Image: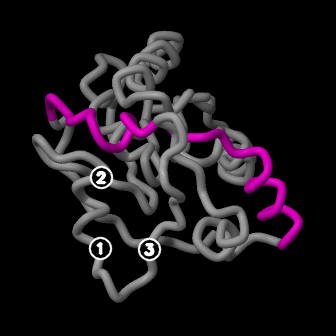
């Protein structure tokens, strides 16, 4: 895979592609061609289609990287002909017939829970006051506030209704390495 120079980054459900800025900077500095997908998070199907559109623009094989809900997207989109491999970064990796929602249901009830508010007209929102702790605890406070204020809403169907039709690749866990 040393010949793979394209990386496609897929964001999670309650943020947008700008959250990948630090990763983008590191990868481009190392000579990779990096594309950042801007999913609408209205449905898994539409996010896979958007990701396929970005993959189709690549000039060769690509590594597809997903974070959080983006893991469900890359697992389905990973069957695209340009995908050489998948990378999950703190991401959901649902198995055949599972959804992000079914995986959320496996979280220990006495442990931390995602601060998802009750749906409004079919859309999900996060509790803004709990955003930093749950999604951006490692960022400077002003960056976390910006992400909370600028993040998209997620359509309920992106987590609940849509189940993957196929599993793109078998996962291999790779330990984190410091730069």
Q: Are marks 2 and 1 in contact (CB under 8 Å)?
A: no
- Toward the left, the furthest residue is 96
Tell which of 10 and 44 is nearer to you.
44
Tell which of 159 and 1 is nearer to you.
159
Per the image, the residue denoted by label 2 is: 101
38 relative position to 22: left or right? left
Coordinates of residue 102 in the picture (x, y in percent): 22, 55
Measured along the vertical axis of the image, is residue 21 above or below residue 137? above
Task: Identify the secondary structure beneath mark 1.
Answer: loop
Residue visible at 36% across and 34% down in the picture: 157
In three-dimensional space, the C-alpha distance between marks 2 and 3, rounded to whole angstroms, equals 12 Å
Per the image, the residue denoted by label 1 is: 107
Q: Are marks 2 and 3 in contact (CB under 8 Å)?
A: no
Q: How many marks?
A: 3
Circle 3 packing at 10 Å, graded few (<14), some (14-19), many (20+), is few
Q: Quadrant of the C terminus?
A: bottom right
Q: Which mark is residue 23?
A: none
């Amino acid at each position: 895979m040393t010949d793979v120079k394209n990386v496609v980054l897929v964001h999670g459900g309650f943020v947008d592609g700008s959250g990948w800025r630090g990763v983008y900077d590191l990868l481009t500095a190392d000579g990779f061609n990096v594309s950042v997908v801007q999913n609408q998070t209205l449905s898994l199907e539409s996010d896979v289609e958007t990701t396929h559109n970005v993959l189709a623009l690549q000039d060769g094989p690509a590594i597809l990287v997903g974070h959080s809900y983006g893991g469900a997207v890359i697992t389905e989109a990973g069957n695209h002909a340009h995908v050489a491999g998948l990378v999950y970064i703190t991401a959901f990796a649902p198995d055949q017939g599972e959804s992000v929602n079914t995986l959320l249901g496996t979280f220990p009830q006495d442990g931390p829970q995602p601060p998802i508010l009750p749906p409004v007209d079919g859309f999900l929102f996060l509790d803004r006051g709990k955003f930093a702790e749950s999604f951006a605890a490692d960022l400077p406070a002003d960056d976390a506030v910006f992400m909370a204020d600028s993040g998209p809403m997620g359509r309920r169907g992106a987590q609940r209704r849509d189940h993957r039709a196929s599993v793109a690749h078998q996962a291999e866990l790779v330990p984190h390495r410091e730069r």
